[in-house]
Image (tube, grey):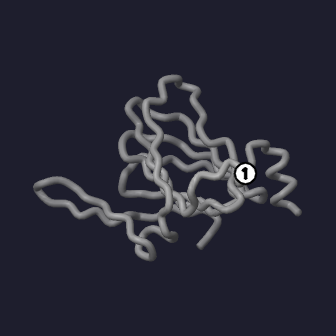
Amino acid sequence: MKQYELINLKAYEDARGNLIAFEQGANCPFDVKRCFYIYDTKMADTVRGAHANRRSEFLLVVIHGSCKVRIDTGKEKDEVLLNSPKTALYLDKMVWKEMFDFSDGAVLMVLSNEKYDEKEYIRDYEKFLKEINN
């Protein structure tokens, strides 16, 4: 799997509504040990993330609304728009990420292969570049 990539999620749709399941090996490339979501971002210039992780991989899914994600692998930079619950963004470890430009009512769910551990976070961009390039 690449350092980051979009994954199309299979939705089970019928008259009752829609359902998307996450299953390791099918549409989630790791065992989920943690799940959190970001919502109610009130300020237009809100930026979440702004860090890299040494061990954590992530799967980002916008459940409602939209947001953008800036991605930096240390070698390439990209920007992805998440605006459908049928699309997930996979982020490998050691990828700098910034989520921003949240629409009104946006809900961004994040799945991870690791439990929270502050020691594995890199919150200084210059330190991230030094680690990734060594």
Report crowding for label 1: few under 14, some 14 to 19, many 20 or more residues within 10 A (C-alpha): few
Identified at 12% across, 54% down, the residue is 16
Quarter of the image for residue 26 reads bottom left
Identified at 77% across, 59% down, the residue is 75
Residue 11 placement, left or right of 17: right
What amino acid is found at the position of numbered circle 1 in the picture?
Lys
> Residue 19, position in %: x, y?
25, 59
Quarter of the image for residue 113 reads bottom right
Answer above or below: position of 79 versus 1.
above
Identified at 56% across, 37% down, the residue is 100
Residue 113 placement, left or right of 121: left
Query: Which secondary structure, mark 1?
Result: helix
> Residue 123, position in %: x, y?
74, 43
Quadrant of the image for the C terminus?
bottom right
Answer above or below: position of 47 versus 91.
above
The residue furthest bottom is 25
Residue 10 placement, left or right of 122: left
**What residue is disc 1 on?**
119
Identified at 47% across, 39% down, the residue is 38
Q: Nearer the viewer, residue 81 or 90?
A: 90
> Residue 54, position in %: x, y?
71, 59
